[in-house]
């Protein structure tokens, strides 16, 4: 399923103390004040002559706004340390965040005048199906597939339509966020979370497991979700993998009995929490950050469950497709996507979790190490079709 356009909006402070708990982090991060960006503004490399007509700096990769202020320069492999990009790639871009992927591609094309990308955009699941069909017919015309969810990447890998990448590409990313055979690698993470209205609830009112939500009287019928959203469907798929179909089906029915309110997307869920229309909901973590960035006094905070599907950390990722004649260029491109500058781009423009250790998340978010996600192979989230069928069977969709 395609992510909605809220993901296209461009909306850690190392010196700010992190909360000791994963629950209620926004309140603990203190008042957000506008200010100039801090950090490195060294010039980035250019084309073959080592210059850049646009004179790009780290600030061109970094987002702006109160959540990004006083941010130190990222660590990790710099674009300056990588070979120049030269040549043309054909890319399939899957999901609503693809506009942001193209913003990053545009920056790379400005740095490297001899590099260009021809991109086709569609939902991640549709493109995964197309790649499988093209691969069965011979080979796909695309060199690289970038997708908003690991399930679509896992599906392509299982179909034998992706090549294993070198350690130079995949080593910077921890094992849980890449394929065990290096056929895809994550470049931006998103944590499932529970945005809640701080005028109505405290962190202690939010259960630590999703199984307890249907019995939580603090919510009443004032809870929201967006079941047509691909991130929600990945969460339900994870529940099916961790628990079983019957348990998941019963949980969905119990949530409906609670009186949950349905929204079109999770940005809407988070905004309605801040408005007080509902007291809490299910959403990816970064939507509350976008609300907080737009409305610094909004009464919204985040809580995280622990060790279950509600604590899932999924990734946007990429893979190199079987049959490409541009494998070396594709690998170099993905090394750039995992560079310090590009990871800073994802962290500060989308509020995603960086995939390399030298770049911190924004706004006082707990690090991935401080979260307690379930022990699950993200490639197992490929059965979104079965999840959609279940959601329809119980009347959620």
Image (spheres, rainbow, N blue to C red):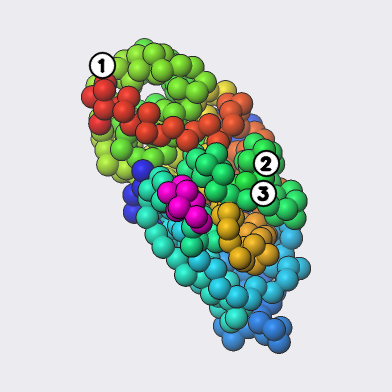
Q: Residues within 10 Å of mark 2 (few under 14, many from 20)?
A: few
Picture coordinates of residue 360, whole percent (x, y): 64, 49
Q: Nearer the viewer's eye, disc 1 or disc 3?
A: 3
Q: Residues within 10 Å of mark 1 (few under 14, many from 20)?
A: few
Query: Which residue is the site of mark 3?
Result: 164
Q: Can you say whether 210 is above or below 62 in the image?
A: above
Picture coordinates of residue 296, whole percent (x, y): 42, 50
376 or 7: which is nearer to us? 376
> Dividing the picture into quarters, in which one does residue 326 lie?
bottom right
Question: Which element carries disc 2, helix, strand or loop?
Answer: loop
Query: Which residue is the site of mark 1?
Result: 257
- Is 357 left or right of 196, judged from the image as shown? right
307 or 287: which is nearer to us? 307
- Is 176 left or right of 100, judged from the image as shown? right
**Residue at (64, 33) in percent of width and height:** 370
371 or 14: which is nearer to us? 371
Query: Which residue is the site of mark 2?
Result: 181
Picture coordinates of residue 313, whole percent (x, y): 54, 36
**Residue at (42, 39) in percent of width and height:** 231
**Residue at (34, 54) in percent of width and height:** 5
> Distance between the Cα atoms at labels 3 and 2?
6 Å
84 or 166: which is nearer to us? 166
Q: Do the residues under discs 1 and 2 have CB atoms within 8 angstroms?
A: no
Q: Do the residues under discs 1 and 3 have CB atoms within 8 angstroms?
A: no
> Distance between the Cα atoms at labels 1 and 2?
43 Å
Q: Can you say whether 354 is above or below 324 in the image?
A: above
Picture coordinates of residue 119, whole percent (x, y): 45, 65
**Residue at (53, 31) in percent of width and height:** 380
> Distance between the Cα atoms at labels 1 and 3?
46 Å
Magenta range is: 132-139
């Amino acid at each position: 399923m395609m992510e909605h356009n809220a993901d296209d909006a461009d909306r850690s402070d190392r010196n700010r103390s992190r909360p000791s708990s994963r629950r209620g982090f926004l309140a603990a991060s203190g008042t957000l004040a506008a200010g100039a960006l801090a950090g490195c503004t060294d010039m980035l490399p250019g084309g073959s002559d080592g210059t850049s007509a646009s004179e790009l700096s780290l600030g061109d990769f970094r987002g702006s706004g109160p959540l990004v202020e006083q941010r130190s320069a990222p660590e990790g492999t710099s674009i300056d340390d990588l070979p120049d990009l030269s040549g043309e790639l054909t890319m399939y871009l899957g999901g609503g965040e693809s506009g942001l992927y193209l913003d990053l591609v545009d920056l790379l094309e400005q740095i490297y005048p001899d590099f260009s990308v021809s991109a086709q955009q569609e939902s991640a699941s549709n493109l995964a199906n197309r790649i499988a069909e093209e691969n069965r017919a011979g080979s796909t015309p695309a060199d690289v597939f970038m997708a908003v969810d690991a399930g679509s990447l896992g599906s392509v890998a299982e179909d034998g339509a992706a090549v294993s990448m070198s350690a130079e590409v995949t080593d910077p990313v921890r094992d849980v966020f890449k394929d065990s055979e290096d056929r895809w690698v994550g470049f931006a993470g998103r944590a499932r979370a529970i945005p809640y209205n701080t005028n109505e609830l405290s962190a202690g009112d939010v259960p630590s497991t999703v199984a307890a939500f249907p019995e939580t009287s603090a919510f009443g019928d004032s809870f929201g979700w967006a079941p047509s959203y691909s991130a929600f469907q990945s969460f339900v798929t994870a529940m099916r993998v961790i628990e079983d179909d019957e348990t998941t089906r019963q949980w969905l029915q119990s949530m409906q009995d609670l009186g949950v309110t349905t929204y079109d997307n999770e940005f809407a869920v988070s905004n309605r929490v801040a408005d007080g229309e509902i007291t809490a909901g299910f959403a990816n973590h970064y939507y509350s950050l976008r609300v907080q960035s737009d409305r610094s006094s909004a009464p919204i905070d985040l809580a995280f469950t622990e060790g279950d599907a509600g604590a899932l950390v999924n990734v946007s990722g990429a893979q190199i497709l079987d049959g490409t004649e541009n494998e070396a260029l594709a690998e170099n491109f993905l090394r750039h996507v995992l560079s310090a500058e590009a990871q800073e781009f994802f962290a500060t423009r989308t509020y995603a979790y960086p995939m390399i250790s030298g770049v911190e998340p924004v706004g006082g978010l707990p690090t991935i190490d401080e979260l307690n996600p379930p022990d699950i192979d993200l490639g197992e989230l490929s059965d979104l079709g079965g999840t959609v069928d279940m959601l329809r069977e119980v009347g959620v969709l």
